[in-house]
Image (cartoon, rainbow, N blue to C red):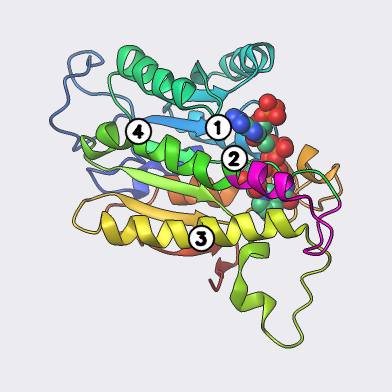
Amino acid sequence: MVSGDDHDQYPCGIAAHPIGLGRCTRNRGTIGGVSEQTIALVTGANKGIGYEIAAGLGALGWRIGVGARDRQRRDTAVEKLRAAGTDAFGVPLDVTDDASVAAAAELIVDHAGGLDVLVNNAAITGDVPQTPTTVDPTTVRIVVETNVIGVMRVTNAMLPMLRASASPRIVNMSSSVGSLALHTTPGVDMGPVPAAYLASKTFLNALTIQYVKELGDTNILINSGCPGFTATDLNGFRGVRTPQQGAAVAIRLATLPDDGPTGGFFDDAGTVPW
Ligand SMILES: NC(=O)c1ccc[n+]([C@@H]2O[C@H](COP(=O)([O-])OP(=O)(O)OC[C@H]3O[C@@H](n4cnc5c(N)ncnc54)[C@H](OP(=O)(O)O)[C@@H]3O)[C@@H](O)[C@H]2O)c1
């Protein structure tokens, strides 16, 4: 797990360094004429795992865009992060809304001058019932709109800024429930999982690989992470991990060194099969 003491282990030129050593070209303001902060956007950062990702990256000295659709929940999260010492700013963001996402990109350009790291964390499970034979097709559409198309929408809007970063990272918060390999491994019991949610994460995994292929000639490291079964609103707080524990994998993938992996699917224990 990455902690505030881990800065020294990173070589120059990586997004993990709080002052962005090695960053070159962008026309951002400098701190004391010397350096710039690493800037990250976390979607769905007002609560749960997203909030803890924002807090964890903020503790590294990064500047954090707190992406959230509800004004009050966003303001509360930003205030709490700031009180804990994070350089946080609110980013109004509904990942299902083209205009909201475009405005978020503009706000980040205006407010921060660029973006180094995008954590696509926002997601929903959708209404039940969700077995393949009972699920309402509208539920499937809504879940895919948020969990898959939302990620594409945000990623594509932020891409120009990420391309301009010296050490860009994209982290897609997925889930091992989206792993077809695990679902088809004899003896592995994935438990009852909502079909629309499950398929949205499989879809997201496929998309992650396609982004890696298309952007293979860039320096953007793109990976999927699974936080494990974490106690949040998403599952009625039935999870067994804390949101802080759930955030650890995203923090690790957001702070990969320049020679770190891309196109992988990871949890705290290592690699998750696609
Ligand atoms: N918890 C687990 O056990 C678990 C396991 C595997 C994977 N994950 C993944 O981890 C990520 C975080 O989940 P979590 O457990 O922290 O869930 P959570 O507590 O329910 O938080 C989800 C976040 O996404 C936001 N969101 C939902 N729809 C949005 C939209 N249209 N636009 C912008 N934001 C939106 C929510 O905002 P509002 O407050 O406005 O609703 C909230 O901030 C998700 O990708 C989830 O699939 C979680």
Question: What's the distance in space between the residues labelled 2 and 1, CA to CA?
Answer: 6 Å
Question: What's the distance in space between the residues labelled 4 and 3, CA to CA?
Answer: 19 Å
Give the magenta part as a residue range. Answer: 129-144
N-term-proximal mark, 4 vs 3: 4
N-term-proximal mark, 4 vs 2: 2
Numbered disc 2: secondary structure: helix
- Judge: label 1 CB < 8 Å from ligand 1: yes
- Asked if residue 51 can be seen in this view, the reply is no
Looking at the image, which is closer to me, 1 or 75?
Answer: 75
Residue at (65%, 39%) from the top-left corner? 49
Residue on which the image places disc 1 = 96
Residue at (35%, 55%) from the top-left corner? 211
N-term-proximal mark, 2 vs 3: 2
The crowd level at tag 1 (other Cα within 10 Å; few <14, some 14-19, many 20+) is many
Numbered disc 1: secondary structure: loop
Q: Amino acid at mark 3?
A: Asn
Question: What's the distance in space between the residues labelled 4 and 1, CA to CA?
Answer: 15 Å
Badge nearest the viewer, 4 or 2: 2
Residue on which the image places disc 3 = 205
- Judge: label 3 CB < 8 Å from ligand 1: no
Mark sitting on residue 146: 2
Residue at (35%, 33%) from the top-left corner? 158
- Judge: label 2 CB < 8 Å from ligand 1: yes
Badge nearest the viewer, 4 or 1: 1
Q: Amino acid at mark 4?
A: Met
